[in-house]
Amino acid sequence: MRLRRERDRFAWAWAGMKVAVKEEAHLRFHLAAAVAACIAGWAVGLSRWEWVVLVLAAGAVITLELVNTAIERVVDLATDKFHPLAKAAKDIAAAAVLVASGFAVVIAVLLFWPHLR
């Protein structure tokens, strides 16, 4: 019985991922960027620890994009009228993705630069 419950939870999470990928262009962009970074990492021969850093950076961006999407959906569900707190919640969640993306770019430069010189 417990295994079935865990399987159901995984299925619900996977369903959420499929919806987000289907409906969110920014998530698709971040996933494509992560795939491109992995291909580039393979091409330049990143070390194990460089891979760890790359995967963590890409994972943080994708995770925050999913959280941003969830926050936007909940705010939209809560109100269809403009409210400054609703706008702030959405803007702050988007800012989290922006900050993580900026750090991911800096990390990518630091990882790839030595391999490209």
Image (cartoon, rainbow, N blue to C red):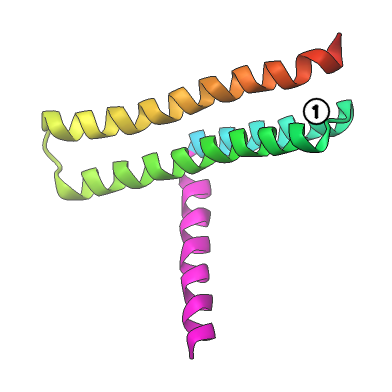
Q: Where is residue 33 in the image (x, y as percent from the top left)?
A: 65, 31
The residue sitting at the top extreme is 117
Q: Which residue is drawn at 44% across and 24% down?
A: 98
- 90 vs 52, nearest the viewer: 52
Residues shaded magenta: 1-24
**Quadrant in which residue 56 is drawn:** top right
Q: Residue at x 29, y 27 (%)?
A: 91
Q: In the displayed structure, does residue 72 sit left or right of residue 43?
A: left
Q: How dense is the environment of label 1, judged by Cα within 10 Å: few (below 14), some, or many (20 and up)?
A: few
Q: In the displayed structure, does residue 12 sit left or right of residue 76?
A: right
The residue sitting at the bottom extreme is 1
Q: Residue at x 53, y 77 (%)?
A: 7
Tell me the kind of residue under disc 1.
Answer: Ala
Residue denoted by label 1: 40
Q: In the displayed structure, does residue 103 sit left or right of residue 78?
A: right
Q: Which residue is drawn at 75% across and 31% down?
A: 50
Which structural element holds mark 1? Answer: helix
- 9 vs 82, nearest the viewer: 9
- 68 vs 54, nearest the viewer: 54
Q: Position of residue 77 (x, y in %)?
A: 21, 50
Q: Is the magenta stretch mostly helix, strand or loop?
A: helix
Q: In the displayed structure, does residue 80 sit left or right of residue 70?
A: left
Q: Position of residue 20 (x, y in %)?
A: 47, 49
Q: Where is residue 65 in the image (x, y as percent from the top left)?
A: 46, 38
In the figure, 5 relative to 52: above or below?
below
Number of numbered discs present? Answer: 1
